[in-house]
Amino acid sequence: MDFEEDETHVAIAEAIRSLCAKFDDDYWASCEAEHRFPWDFYQLIAQGGWLGIAIPEQYGGGGRGISEAAIVLKEVAASGAGMNGCSAVHLTIFGLNPVVRFGNERLKSEFLPRAAAGDLHVAFGVTEPDAGTDTSRIATRAEPDGRGGYIVRGRKIWTTKALESQVVLLLVRTGGEGFKGLSLLLADLDPRYVDIRPIPKMGRNAVASCEVAYDDLPVEGWRLVGKEGEGWKYLLHGLNPERILLSAESIGIGEAALRRAVSYAKEREVFGRPIGANQAIAHPLAQAHVQLRAAWQLSRYAAWLYDHGRDCGEAANSAKFAAAEAGFFAADRAVQALGGMGYATEYHVERYFREARLQRIVPVSQEMTLNYVAQQVLGLPRSY
């Protein structure tokens, strides 16, 4: 393997760091406290062309791969933006991948250029109150309208960015039970037929997660992604790259927390010396560094496999697990190193802690990730 640094990757990381430097921790803390979408940040990311980094060039994007998108999101998270910054742009950067891969030409030409330019916000509607991890139980239905289109009725939860988005990539039931009855629609979030309510939650409040009710929402037939009944297959195609990108975000959060903790450990003096001289402080921070570096190498490897058309299921799931654990460990030890100040909002590590904890739940729990490895890699019997 060639471990020489890619000049393009270095340039991307430096450019994102420079852009993110305009938004300090206090900016992100205020967005969080006020439940305010980070529009200034979003606009700069859009103006720089970063939103379309993984969208094909023919539709106004950068034509890059998951490797480059992961670098962007890692640097955004590491700047102190955390999940608020990443969630503001993640769904535009990669949420339309099923459209890129399986959409008809009208869908692509209509929506991809707008997404790449930052003029189109995209939400993702999959999870339901009675269909979380068990996607096969999705009940939101799209019935034929008699004119080649659909009428959608149902309810989704945890739809990120629904308040800001014009369209939603919606997983609906068009057939019978199970996975084969599911289809994907790129539908408008038309307020005449859609009711959106933010879900109060522990963190990442600059970007709301919402409950969305669909009451006879009309969707034109050309808004169907690919073929009817193939929606679950299309989503599966995007699960591995999504895990890779979320791995990068976890690592970025961990790096931000570690940076804060190291700085504090060098400056804070107790009993006549910096607390960083104590191994009880130094060793956990060193361990956090090692774990973050290891997780990043695994994430980069998974991204390389995906971008080169190789099987990356094991690597992507392993990276997701390792990165979520590493990010949370770093944030947890940062709070511990700062002691009481780690619990205070002034030093921001409590915000990193809450966001790093989220990464052990989404987009799928650590336990389900281990189920994949146990069954698909180790060949153990299925447990559910």
Image: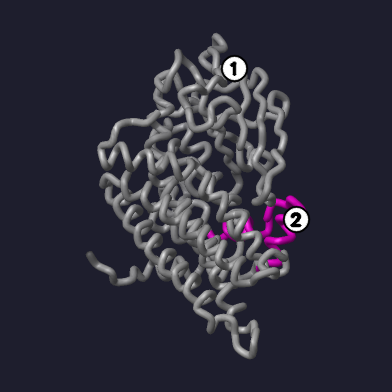
Is 95 placed left or right of 159 in the picture?
left
- Please say which color scheme the image uses: one colour
Specify the quadrant of the image occupied by residue 27.
Answer: bottom right
Q: Which residues are magenta?
A: 24-48
Q: Can you say whether 103 is above or below 20 in the image?
A: above
Specify the quadrant of the image occupied by residue 247.
Answer: bottom left
Q: Which residue type does callout 1 highlight?
A: Ile
Give the quarter of the figure containing the N terminus.
bottom left
Which residue is denoted by mark 1 in the rendering? 151
x 48%, y 42%: residue? 365
Could you say which disc has been placed on residue 311 in the image? none
| x then y, percent, for residue 41 | 64, 59
Q: Residues within 10 Å of mark 1 (few under 14, many from 20)?
A: some
Q: Which residue of the protein is positioned furthest toward the top in this rendering?
A: 146
Could you say which disc has been placed on residue 33 in the image? 2
Q: Main secondary structure of the magenta part?
A: helix
Give the quarter of the figure containing the C terminus.
top left
